[in-house]
Each structure stands twice: as C-alpha cells, then as structure tokens.
Image (spheres, rainbow, N blue to C red):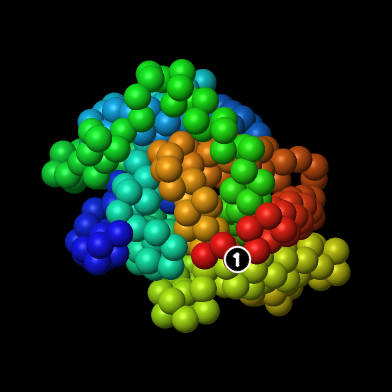
C-alpha cells in the first residue's frame, strides 16, 4: 500500500468524526432529560429507557444492513441516505406525542447513526491498515470525544431552558450538517474493488467472518469492552440523580468526566501505538476496564450511599474503566478490521452490530431491581469478563496480529 494511503488528513478525520458521532450525540445529549421525558409522556423509567434500547438496536441493524451492502454498492451514496434518514427521525422524535412514537423514531434515528458509524470505519479500512488505522481511529475518536463532554452539558442546559423536545430539534440541525459533509465525501471503494453477486452474497461474506476465530475474539473484546461503558451510560442518570441527588446539570458535569477519560486514552494511544503496537495496548486496555469494573462493584457493595465520598469513588472507578475502553476501542477495531481487510464493510458491520446489541441489552439490565448501583456494577463486571475471553481467543488464533 503506497504512502499516500497511509495517512488521512485531520479535516477528513474531523468529517468522519461528525458522520460517526451518532452514538454519543444520540444518547448523551438527551440523558439529562430522561426523567422529564418520562413525566411528560406518562411513562415509567423502564419504558423511557427503551428509547435507548431502540436506538441501540437501530444502530446494530443499520450497521448489519448497510455495511455488507456498501462492499458491493460503494460507501458514499449509502452514507448520504443514512444522514437524510437521521434528519427525518430527529424531527419525529422532537414532535412525538407518546412514548411509543418516540421509541419508534429513536429506532430509525439509530439506523441513521449506525450507517454513519459503519461506513466511516469501512472508509478508513479502505485506506489504512494496522497501526496506521489504529492511529487514525484514535484521532477520529479524539475529535468525537468532544461530543460526550459537550453533549450532556448542552443537553442539560437545553433541557432546563426549553425542554426535552428542543434537544431533538438540535439533533435535527446537526443532521443537516452531517448531510452536507456526507455529500462532499469522495468514494473510497472504487468499482473494481467491489464485491459482486448481489446482497445475498454480501451477507454470506459477513457470516463467513464468524469462521475466523481471531476476528470473533477481537469483535467480542470491542463489543463487550464498550458494554461496560454503556452500562454506566444507561444507568448513570438515575444513579447520580436519584441515588446521589444531583441536578441534571450536576449530573452532566460528572458525566463529562468519562469524555475526559476517552480523550486522554486516545491521545495516549496516538503517541504509543506505533511504538508498542495495537495488540499489546489492547491487552492493557481490557485489564484497565476490569480494574475499573470491579471497583464499581465494590463501591456498590461496601460504601454507604449517603456520603459524597461514595459518589467520588464511583466517579474514579468509572474513569479508570472508561480510560481502558478508550484504549480498547481503537486497537481492537484496527486489529479486527485487519483480519477482515478483504471485506471491510462486512467486518465493520459485525463490529458495530455486536457493539450496539450489547449496549441495547445493557440498557434494560441496569434498570432491573431496586439497587441501581449494584445492578450497574454487576453488569460492568459481567461485560468485561466476556471482553477478556475474547482477547484470549484472539491471542490463541492470531498471536502476532498487528
């Protein structure tokens, strides 16, 4: 691969970051408004959290549908379609009269978000391999990392000033910007490199990836590593506001610490991955996630809930876990995509679908039972255990992958 294909400009990666920002923007911005949405629409917390689940399921299905199709049809046209769908879904969310309509619209908003995620990841894989891909993904995630800092803060302010519907109108404006960026993107998969044979063959190509154990292992590490963080994302609003009594703005400030962890991890990864390698950094990452997840569980089991120290201990534990997630996501993605280089769209689809299926499962699980903090700790520990198993599987079948 020539040198020109071993680098992507910052502006290109910034555009990719905006197009793939559906995940943090679609979840983090409206998290401070979840209790208000429930009261306004007459829905229980469990029902309101289904709007998160619907979004995650949409993200997963969108990636499964669009990723393999893009291996045969190209990336750009499908990318533009997804961004237009996101605009329409955001407007429907903003005007939803019932929880059922909101949940349905969130599903299609998720499909749009999944389209952006799966195609930008495939477009990077079209251009880069190995440590170069991991570095590019880290740069992109470093830019995306601004979203989890600003999104909950902006969402909290908008919620306080204009109500939860204004949050979705803001997302509609962001979707307009995504449409413009998508339209200006060049096609990265030329006709001669596309897979023929129609959709059936493309989906068979995707299923064929499950016969590659090392790819499956890194996909598990990617999805369930993210699952630990998403368990916190889904449960944090209720834990911080109902257990520790924070306001929506106070919760947003605490939640932004996770974005700082992600930014720090990706900044470090950019500096280290070319020297240490993606494989070693990925193993360090899952160990950090495990330490943080176990610490969250210990906070739930040992510390009293009526003292500020418990809240700060929880924040520190989640920070460690989220730092590990930041390291893990870039490196496990690059390693997995390197093992699926001949079908980048399908590989990206499997990674993304697995990630958001796990996220969709975590959302209702952390809402079960009367002890939200204990449920959170158990979910995080269970998720990182599977991520570790995936890392070990990949190490067995591809010990020298980079």
Given residues 147 and 283, the one toward you in this image is: 283
235 over 52 or under it: above or below: below
64 over 352 or under it: above or below: above
Given residues 72 and 9, the one toward you in this image is: 72
Residue 372 on image: x %, y %: 74, 51
* Residue neighbourhood size for the residue with mark 1, other residues' Cα within 10 Å, grouped as few (<14), some (14–19), many (≥20): few
Residue 295, quarter of the rendered image: bottom right
Q: Residue at x 62, y 43 (%)?
A: 212
Q: Residue at x 81, y 67 (%)?
A: 298
Given residues 352 and 291, the one toward you in this image is: 352
Q: Residue at x 52, y 79 (%)?
A: 276
Q: Residue at x 53, y 44 (%)?
A: 351
Would residue 41 be visible to someone looking at this image?
Answer: no
Residue 140 on image: x %, y %: 35, 61
Residue 38 on image: x %, y %: 55, 34
Residue 367, quarter of the rendered image: top right
Residue at which label 1 appears: 400
Q: Disc count in the image? A: 1
Instruction: Please state, as top left, top right, bottom left or bottom right, where the N terminus lies in the image.
Output: bottom left
Q: In screen coordinates, is 132 left or right of 384? A: left
Q: In screen coordinates, is 3 left or right of 219? A: left
Q: In screen coordinates, is 1 left or right of 58? A: left
333 over 189 or under it: above or below: below
Residue 204 on image: x %, y %: 52, 25
């Amino acid at each position: 691969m020539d040198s020109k294909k071993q680098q992507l400009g910052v502006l290109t990666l910034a555009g990719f970051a905006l197009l793939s920002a559906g995940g943090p923007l679609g979840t983090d911005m409206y998290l401070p408004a979840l209790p208000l949405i429930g009261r306004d629409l007459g829905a229980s917390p469990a029902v309101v959290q289904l709007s998160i689940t619907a979004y995650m399921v949409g993200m997963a299905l969108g990636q499964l549908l669009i990723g393999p199709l893009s291996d045969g049809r190209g990336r750009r046209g499908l990318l533009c379609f997804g961004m237009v769908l996101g605009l329409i879904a955001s407007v429907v969310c903003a005007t939803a009269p019932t929880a059922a309509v909101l949940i349905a619209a969130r599903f299609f908003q998720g499909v749009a978000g999944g389209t952006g995620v799966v195609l930008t990841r495939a477009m990077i894989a079209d251009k880069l391999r190995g440590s170069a891909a991991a570095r590019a993904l880290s740069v992109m995630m470093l830019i995306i990392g601004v979203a989890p800092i600003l999104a909950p803060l902006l969402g909290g302010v908008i919620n306080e000033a204009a109500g939860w519907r204004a949050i979705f109108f803001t997302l509609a404006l962001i979707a307009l910007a995504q449409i413009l960026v998508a339209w200006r993107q060049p096609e990265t998969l030329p006709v001669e490199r596309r897979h023929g044979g129609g959709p059936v063959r493309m989906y068979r190509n995707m299923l064929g990836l499950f016969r590659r154990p090392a790819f499956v292992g890194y996909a598990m590490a990617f999805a369930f590593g993210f699952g630990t963080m998403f368990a916190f994302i889904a449960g944090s609003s209720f834990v911080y506001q109902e257990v520790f009594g924070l306001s929506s703005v106070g919760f947003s400030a605490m939640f932004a610490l996770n974005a700082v962890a992600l930014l720090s991890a990706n900044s470090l990864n950019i500096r280290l991955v070319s020297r240490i390698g993606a494989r070693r950094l990925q193993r360090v990452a899952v160990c950090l996630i495990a330490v943080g997840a176990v610490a969250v569980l210990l906070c739930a089991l040992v510390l009293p809930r009526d003292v500020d120290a418990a809240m700060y201990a929880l924040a520190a534990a989640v920070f460690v876990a989220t730092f590990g997630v930041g390291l893990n996501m870039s490196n496990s993605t690059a390693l997995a995509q390197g093992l699926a280089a001949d079908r980048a769209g399908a590989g990206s689809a499997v990674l993304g679908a697995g990630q958001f299926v796990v996220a969709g499962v975590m959302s209702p699980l952390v809402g079960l039972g009367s002890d939200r903090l204990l449920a959170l700790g158990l979910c995080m520990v269970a998720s990182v255990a599977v991520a570790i198993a995936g890392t070990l599987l990949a190490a067995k079948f591809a010990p020298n992958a980079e």
